[in-house]
Image (cartoon, rainbow, N blue to C red):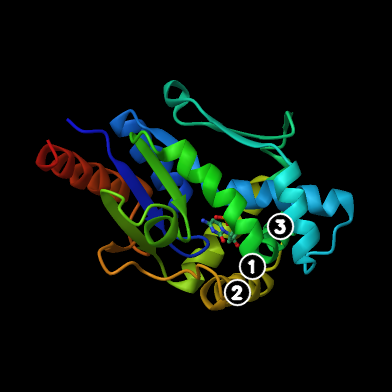
Amino acid sequence: MRRLIIAIDGPVGAGKSTVARRVAELLGYLYLDSGAMYRALALAALRAGVPLADAARLEALAAQSRIELQSDPSSGGRLRVLLNGEDVSEAIRSAACARAASQVAQHAGVRQHLVAEQRRLGAAGGVVMEGRDIGTAVFPDAHLKIFLDASVEERARRRLSDHRSRGENIPFEQMLAEVRERDRRDRTREVSPLVRAPDAVYLDSTALEAEEVARLIALLARRRSGEAG
Ligand code: DC
């Protein structure tokens, strides 16, 4: 069976990470979270005091920074994110980092650096990569593309519980406003905005468990890899 490149795109809170990690586990593939790379760069920028609107300095920072994703299929796809050798897997999950990531991701030069690295990581196949532009820009020839969506209220609820589990308490109305703002930025930016690829399978996870969605995607992948020989 051919080892596929599976692209899972969608807005914030649609369940991409949980689903992509589980699909990778079911298939014995590598799980790669492209958003973690934008978050790691955002963290580097916040620490270095680089303004998030300064495209030239952010691009230089992207060129200098070593951002690595280490995925281990044997540990349920747990992903470690390294910034210049430092494990920043937890640090990049703060609400401040999420906000900053969606701003650094606006810049074409930044994206060029990170997309090149994403292509290198996924080129051999046997990967599930999640993000916003995987099926449209990073791997337009991906063997299986999924666009994972959910209602904005459900996505805000999921984000809220992610943050709560890390001890960050944010009122629901504020979370909803932040999710809407990130949607707006991700969907309207000039470079590689979040759009559904015409050949992507659209899945609405509002009323589905992550496990159900993951099994459905794994089934589609097995069919497709059989077809691909
Ligand atoms: O998936 P996430 O929330 O961890 O992503 C953080 C930010 O990075 C998100 O606001 C948009 C950006 N991003 C992107 O522009 N392209 C990707 N392929 C992945 C994430």
- The amino acid pointed to by label 3 is Ala
Q: Is mark 2 within 8 Å of ligand 1?
A: yes
**Upstream in sequence: badge 3 or badge 2:** 3
**Upstream in sequence: badge 2 or badge 1:** 1
- The amino acid pointed to by label 2 is Arg
Distance in Å between CA atoms under marks 3 and 2:
16 Å
- The amino acid pointed to by label 1 is Gln
Q: Is mark 3 within 8 Å of ligand 1?
A: no
CB-based contact (under 8 Å), mark 2 and mark 1: yes
Compared across the picture, whether 80 is left or right of 25 comes to: right
Residue 168 shows in this picture: no
Disc 3 designates what residue?
A: 95
Examine the rendered structure and indicate whether residue 159 appears above or below residue 67. below
Disc 1 designates what residue?
A: 106
The tag on residue 185 is 2
Examine the rendered structure and indicate whether residue 93 appears above or below residue 203. above
Q: Residue at x 45, y 50 (%)?
A: 130
Q: Residue at x 33, y 34 (%)?
A: 126
Distance in Å between CA atoms under marks 1 and 3:
18 Å
CB-based contact (under 8 Å), mark 1 and mark 3: no
